[in-house]
Image (tube, helix red, strand yellow):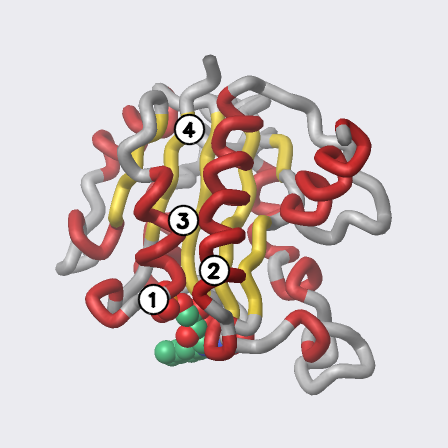
Amino acid sequence: MKSVLVLFAHPKFEHSKTNKALVSKIQNREGVTFHDLYERYPDFNIDLPKEKELLKAHDVVIWHHPFYWYNCPPLMKQWIDVVLEFNWAYGPEGNALQDKKCLNVITTGGAREVYCSSGNNHYSVNEFLRPFEQTARLCGMEYLPPFAVMGTHNLSKENLDTYVDQYDELINALQEGKTFNITKECEFLNDTLLLNKKKEA
Ligand SMILES: Cc1cc2nc3c(=O)[nH]c(=O)nc-3n(C[C@H](O)[C@H](O)[C@H](O)COP(=O)(O)O)c2cc1C
């Protein structure tokens, strides 16, 4: 079974609805290390050896966060800046993360239809996430499409419950080392999971 490290960053987790629900089902799963960065590092003083040790010990790395100004919250950026060191994560001698899988799990206030060239946000979520994609690639990791929960302000309890189950299914697939059949119509891993389910039915 593959081991999964969930690096979680939410500056106001006590007020969270969507991420609280998403996290509830996966955080105590066997083989999953749920690492709440704001809880562990409220002073932003990241323990570099500890983070390196955690990364080394896992096969899959998830950057899980709400979308804040089309990006991650600041502590996650700090984590990237501090932990992904030259000649450790990248560079001529930097191969510590080689061949691990990596992806973003994000929640957005904006609905899916506003994240396109004709929508209010002009760009897709995947386009906004390009720096994460390239960061993962530079570190030799295999970057997967994001798992996204969008339109959080208007999400019904029923829809949220569906996403909670989907996230759990995703973790299961990652642990089993399943290969995702990523096609053009699959912008998000949510789409891939749904497509695979339809094919299996
Ligand atoms: C400071 C801040 C910036 C935000 N920026 C964005 C944004 O760029 N795009 C977007 O779709 N939603 C944005 N939102 C909305 C959050 O993404 C949304 O409230 C969150 O994903 C909901 O998850 P939660 O219930 O776990 O807090 C922002 C919210 C805050 C507080």
Marks 2,4: beta carbons within 8 A: no
Marks 1,2: beta carbons within 8 A: yes
Q: What whole-number distance in Å separates the C-alpha atoms at marks 4 and 1?
A: 23 Å
In the image, what residue type sits under mark 1? Answer: Lys
Question: Is tag 3's residue or tag 2's residue first in the polypeptide sequence?
Answer: 3
Q: Nearer the viewer, mark 4 or mark 1?
A: 1
Marks 3,2: beta carbons within 8 A: no
In the image, what residue type sits under mark 3? Answer: Ile
What percent of the width, then of the height, locates residue 100?
54, 25
What percent of the width, then of the height, locates residue 95?
51, 23
Q: Residue at x 55, y 73 (%)?
A: 151
Quick one: label 3, few (<14), some, or many (20+) residues within 10 Å? Answer: few
Farthest right residue in view: 184
What percent of the width, then of the height, locates residue 32?
35, 29
Which numbered disc covers residue 67? Answer: none
Q: What whole-number distance in Å separates the C-alpha atoms at marks 3 and 1?
A: 26 Å
Establish if 144 lies above or below 120: above
Residue 124 appears in the figure: yes
Q: Which residue is mark 4?
A: 4
Is the C-beta of the residue carrying label 4 under 8 Å from the nearest atom of ligand 1? Answer: no
Q: What whole-number distance in Å separates the C-alpha atoms at marks 2 and 4?
A: 23 Å
Q: What SS does tag 3 mark?
A: helix
Is the C-beta of the residue carrying label 1 under 8 Å from the nearest atom of ligand 1? Answer: yes
